[in-house]
Image: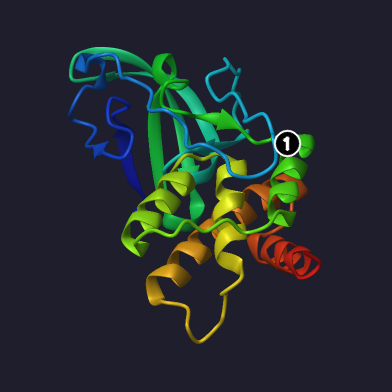
Amino acid sequence: MGEQQVVEDVSNPVAEQPAAEAPATNPEPRVAPRPPHNGPNLTPRAIAKAEVLVEGDHVVYPTHGVGRVERIATEEIAGHKLELIHITFEENRMTLRVPVAKARTAGLRKLATRKQFDEALAVLKGKARVKRTMWSRRAQEYEAKINSGDPLAIAEVVRDLHRNAGQPDQSFSERQIYESAMDRLAAELAALDKTDKAAAINKLTDFLKTV
């Protein structure tokens, strides 16, 4: 199968639209509030800040994780000329095309700095905070944190679910969410360290053993 290419409809960040539909006709999107942090008093990364992207940059798209800017080009879609950022996600063989004008509201950002990622590691050191609510509600909150693209929020998920990682009483869905959060965090660490995700997962796992 060939690589999938989609134009992101930023009025609904979790939905992908085929290239035949013009995202320029969508109303201006409303940015959803970012999940609160339960860890130390840290300043979340301001993903709305304007960032200049160039070919070859590693970037983070909230619902897809770490990708790479393949190119930025003006194209005509359904009669509309749009400047699009082509982002490739090698792991799932997909290319996402995000309009430059709406990249910020879509949550597209560069990789976290080393200092910002160190703040995420500091979250991992914190005490797990598990609400006494139904698992289905907590699972939704964890998924929202993962899809926020915020390394601090993702680190909270890893921290809160790590205590049961690999234990017999861990549910299938809990294990899936934990692995998804670890995968997202490791992907960004791998890009920062210029290594592969497997090495990053080992690094994070070793770090968690010291907590």
Which residue type carries mark 1? Gln
Q: Is residue 178 above or below residue 153?
A: below
Name the residue at 47% across, 20% down: 104
Report the quarter where the N terminus lies: bottom left
Q: Is residue 79 left or right of residue 206?
A: left
Q: Position of residue 4 (x, y in %)?
A: 33, 48
Q: In which quarter of the view is residue 125 placed?
A: bottom right
Q: Is residue 196 left or right of residue 67?
A: right
Q: Is residue 160 above or below residue 95?
A: below
Q: Answer whether residue 115 is visible to the viewer in this image.
A: yes
Which residue in the rendered view is the most extreme toward the front?
132
Q: Is residue 200 left or right of residue 151?
A: right
Report the quarter where the C terminus lies: bottom right
Which residue in the rendered view is the most extreme toward the bottom?
168
Q: Answer whether residue 182 is visible to the viewer in this image.
A: no
Q: Is residue 134 above or below residue 170?
A: above
Give 188 or 47, whichever is nearer the viewer. Answer: 47
Name the residue at 42% across, 28% down: 33
Q: Position of residue 131 (x, y in %)?
A: 47, 56
Could you tell me which secondary element the residue under label 1 belongs to? Answer: helix
Judging from the image, the colouring scheme is: rainbow
Q: Is residue 84 above or below residue 40?
A: above
Identify the residue under disc 1: 116
Q: Residues within 10 Å of mark 1 (few under 14, many from 20)?
A: some
Name the residue at 54% across, 34% down: 69
Q: Position of residue 183 (x, y in %)?
A: 56, 59
Q: Position of residue 65 (x, y in %)?
A: 50, 46
Give 162 or 1, whichever is nearer the viewer. Answer: 162
